[in-house]
Every structure is written in structure tokens, then in C-alpha cells.
Image (cartoon, rainbow, N blue to C red):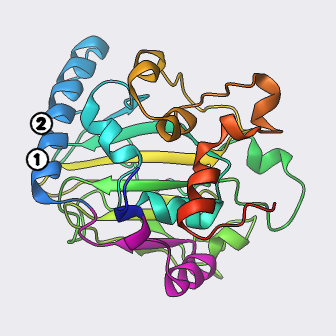
Amino acid sequence: MSNAWLENQLTPEEESSFAENGYMIIENAIPPDLVERATAVLDRLTAEAKANEGLGPDDGINIFDFIGKDDVFLELLDYPTTFPKVWGILGWNIQLYHSHTIVTPPNAVSGPGQQGLNWHKDSARLNNELETDPQPRISLKVAFFLTDTSELGRANLYVIPGSHLLNKLPVDEDRKPAGGIAVRAKPGDAVFFDRRIWHASSPNTSDVPRKVLFYGYSYRWLRPRDDMTVDHLMGRVDPIRQQLLGAAPSGWHGYSSPKPEDVPLRAWMQERAGENGAD
């Protein structure tokens, strides 16, 4: 728990922009030394995962459930420049429900995006089974970029601004996706995006690798999207990190009807951030 959280709360301008566009970029969210440390660990995990899956150096890979594999990833879980904006958007009843990383080598021969733009919304069946239009947000992702995608052709993330309020993919007169733009993020930038926004990965046609860490935050009553292998961390992290990693001291009922011990973030916000916690 850091007082730096108070210095990086969601601003009214950021709140308005995110509500309108469905995404936002926090430039220089993490410093170069942390980018370097995270990259070194990710390179090791990538090599191990590719060996286990029989993939070669030119194959892209999507690795799930990285959060418990190294403390550098735990450091980013509640990082001062990003986490206050997460609870500024979603509130205090939140958790990390998903972590994954996409690594796309230069001129990759396989992996996410290599076959072209794969427009989609996150969370799969939620998009089929929630009846409202527009659907509720429920979750968001924070993507920490470890490599430079400030130029096109570097497996850029693509988004359609404002499409988080559209259940159907917006198309032009030729029935092609309309309004998509490339996100040009630099190493150390963090990109927030609403789970509902239509977005896509894209091919890497450059000589620069693309490495991104995705942290998915949701309300605590949503089931995790991967294994969340974090039991080994619970005995040595503070109560707010325990909450984010899925703890519910009061039992299963505490996910939908939390007691104070289930959501220490709420008390922290009430005491320090002026959050009344009434709802």
C-alpha cells in the first residue's frame, strides 16, 4: 500500500476519455529498469514455454497465468501509476482474474495476429449470454508494453474507439470493420482497455519483437479466466494483494456479498482516498 496511489488516481479527464473511447494510454507508466527486469524474466518463461510446446524461435506464443511465476509480475499487480486508475474505474470490489502475455517475434510465422486482424471482444461467452445493449463493462485489461510498437507493423494492438458501447462489430459499406486504429505504445507505456471494446492483434512484419503483459481486472464475483496459480504467494503478501489474488476470508459467499475482511481495499479507500464505500 503506497501513498503514491493517491498521487496517481484517475483524473476527471481520464475518466471521461475512457468512458467515451473505451481505452487510454498511460505513458511511461513503468521505468526502464523495471521494463528491463520484466523483459528478462519474460524471455526466460518464453523459452521454457516454447520448449514445452515444441515451438521454434519464429513462433509467437500466448502464455497464460504468469502472475505467480516471478515477483516482478507481482510488482506490477498494484503498481502506483496504474492500479489507482483501475479502482478509479471499477471500484473496490475487484480482483485480478486473468494474466497472459503475448510474445510475437520479428516476422513471426505463427501466433496471435499473424493471420491478420482478429477483431473480438474479451470474455467469450459473456458476449453471447449478457442480454443488454450495451453490455456492462465487468472487467478491463492493463497492457504493459515492454517493447516498442510506436511504428506500424510491429504487431500493434488495434482498437475501434467507442466500440465498447456497440454489441456488434461496426462495419463500413463493404462490410469491413470500420474505425480501427493502431495503438502506438512505447516500452513502459500501459494501455487500459475496456473488455467490451472491439480490438485485434496484428501481424509483426518488422525486425522488432513485440512483448506485452496483460493484467485482467474484474469484479470479484466473476470466475477467473485462467488457473490463477497463486496459493504460494498468499502467506507473504499484504491484505490488498491477497484480495487482488482472489482471497475471500469469509468464504464463497464473500465474493458476491463481501465482508470487510474480504475487501481491505475498500477500507483503504475510505480512509485515504475519500471513498465513502456506500454502494
Q: Secondary structure at mark 2?
A: helix
| Residue in front for this viewpoint, 107 or 278 | 278
**Kind of residue at badge 2:** Ala
Q: Position of residue 41 (x, y in %)?
A: 17, 32
Residue that label 2 marks: 40
Residue at x 64% of width, y 52% of height: 266
Asked if residue 159 is among those painted magenta in the image, a careful observer would answer: no
Q: Residue at x 47, y 58 (%)?
A: 200
Magenta span contains residue 9: yes
Position of 155 compared to 217: left or right?
left
Q: Which residue range is magenta in the image?
A: 6-29
In the image, residue 234 above or below residue 190? above
Nearer the observer, 47 or 279:
279
Q: Amino acid at mark 1?
A: Glu
Q: Are marks 1 and 2 in contact (CB under 8 Å)?
A: yes
What residue sits 51% from the left and 87% below the top? Answer: 13
**Towards the viewer: 15 or 101:** 15
**What residue is drawn where x is 30% and y is 49%?**
212
140 relative to 132 in the view: left or right = left
Q: Is residue 101 visible?
A: yes
User: For residue 28, which quarter of the picture?
Assistant: bottom left
- Secondary element at image label 1: helix
Relative to 38, say whether 178 is above or below: below
**Residue 77 horizontal side relative to residue 109, left or right:** right
Crowd tier of the residue under label 2, counting other residues whose Cα lies within 10 Å: few below 14, some 14–19, many 20 or above = few
Q: In which quadrant of the rendered view does residue 126 lie?
A: top right
**Where's residue 151, x and y in %?**
20, 71
Across and down, in percent, residue 233 comes to 41, 22
**Label 1 crowd (10 A; few <14 / some 14-19 / many >=20):** some
Q: Which residue is mark 1?
A: 36
